Image: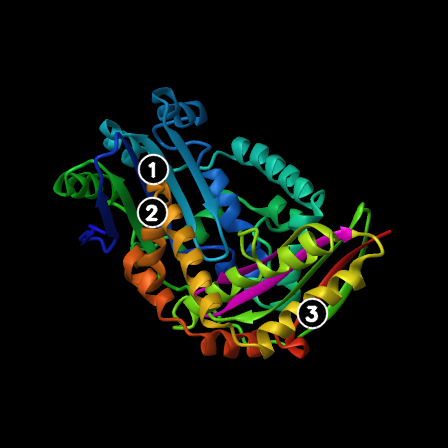
Amino acid sequence: MNYREYRLPSGIRLVHEPTGSPVAHCGVYIGTGSRDEEEREHGMAHFIEHAIFKGTRRRKVYHILTRLENIGADLNAFTTKEETCVYASFQRGYYERALELIADILFDSVFPEKELLKEKSVIMDEINSWKDNPSDQIFDDFEELVFAGHPLGRNILGKKANLKRFTQAHIRHFIEKNYTPDQIIISSVGDIPFQKLIRLAERYFEKVPSGNGTRHRIPFSGYQPVRKQVRKNTFQTHCILGNLACGFGDPRRIPVALLNNVLGGPGMNSRLNLSVREKHGLTYNIESGYTPYADTGLFTIYLGVDNGLLDKTLHFVDLELEKLRKIKLGTNQMNIARRQFIGQLAIAWESNLGRMLSMGKGILVMERVQSLEEMCRQIGSVTAEQLQEIACEMLDPDRLSRLTFLSR
């Protein structure tokens, strides 16, 4: 992996990987998400992600939305619990156009009240849509259950009551507090000389204000397993199990990710899929997931089943968890697990867009970029003893929380 780094005089970090592709990808990561909101600000990070597209000192909405779209490029953004990202994919000759536009909307938006009012209505519709999808909502509600009383437990979309109160002044205060150069990464994968990229970044990002630097993230502690049932107007019963897991900086992150892949990852040969779906035909969708955060993480198992089949399905899930705790994977099983995970990563690494996003997050969270070769070495060194030890800790039935959406 041939990437280069540079720190602008302002403190913003730049990371770039050169490619010969005619298509380039460039994005700006900001280390601010929903966990950085105060309770009265719940939903602000996501609201700002929408609001930055609504007008700058130089451009109205139409000119923002057509600046890249008119050349066949793609401009997009997303918000997570720990970061906000604005990025673009475009033909390699349009680097300056993309960087200038991203800088303009991120740091020169004027947030017109009329446009904010319309966008509040759009986000309220997004919230309603989310509530109409129980297989999505249950994940957010589960995090609220596990991280009760902590900012990590708040869903990204926020609350309608908060949304109605947000003003230009609230937005500017949040940006000043959180959008600081030390939390900003410019990530690029494309065909452009590195020195030219540096000049463009300095030209359009040097005036980023330093902010007041008052943000302080509260670490999560005091997890207690909890079980909850909620009645919903659904056709299915939805259920999610889970426990805390390690964060980005923990050396067990790769073993946890490998264990997740074995248990219920995307492969059709995952243990949960083979047992619950293929052998017993109890569900269309069963999966496990691992979400690492900066200082903690979450491991989950999700399933949707016909009403009346939950207990039977959970019985077979429990059997698979017990096997991982009590029976160490054999040599052949470990080799297959490692090869499969490495193959999946290699395929994902083929995406230039995916690499651009991965590099930006790596610099932001770990101060470095992990190469595919390094990750493959780490996967190759995971032992069966490590997986069993993690399974005993993370899949302990006494430590698992459960949330169930029961059909009315």
Please state the horizontal and vertical placement of residue 223, each as a whole percent of the image. 60, 76
Q: Nearer the viewer, mark 3 or mark 2?
A: 3
Please state the horizontal and vertical placement of residue 83, each as a whole percent of the image. 43, 54
Tell me the crowding category of disc 2: few under 14, some 14 to 19, or many 20 or more residues within 10 angstroms, Cα based: many
Q: Please name the amino acid that badge 1 sits on.
A: Ile
The secondary structure type at the circle numbered 2 is: helix
CA gap, disc 2 and disc 1: 19 Å
Please state the horizontal and vertical placement of residue 328, each as a whole percent of the image. 53, 76
Q: Please name the amino acid that badge 3 sits on.
A: Asp
Is residue 130 found left or right of 93 in the rendered image?
right
Is residue 240 found left or right of 196 in the rendered image?
right
Residue carrying label 3: 318
Residue 373 visible, this angle: yes
How many numbered circles are shown?
3
Q: Nearer the viewer, mark 3 or mark 1?
A: 3
Residue 357 visible, this angle: no
CA gap, disc 3 and disc 1: 48 Å
Residue 102, disc: 1
Residue 355, disc: 2
Is residue 98 found left or right of 311 in the rendered image?
left
Query: In this rendering, is residue 287 above or below 190?
Result: below
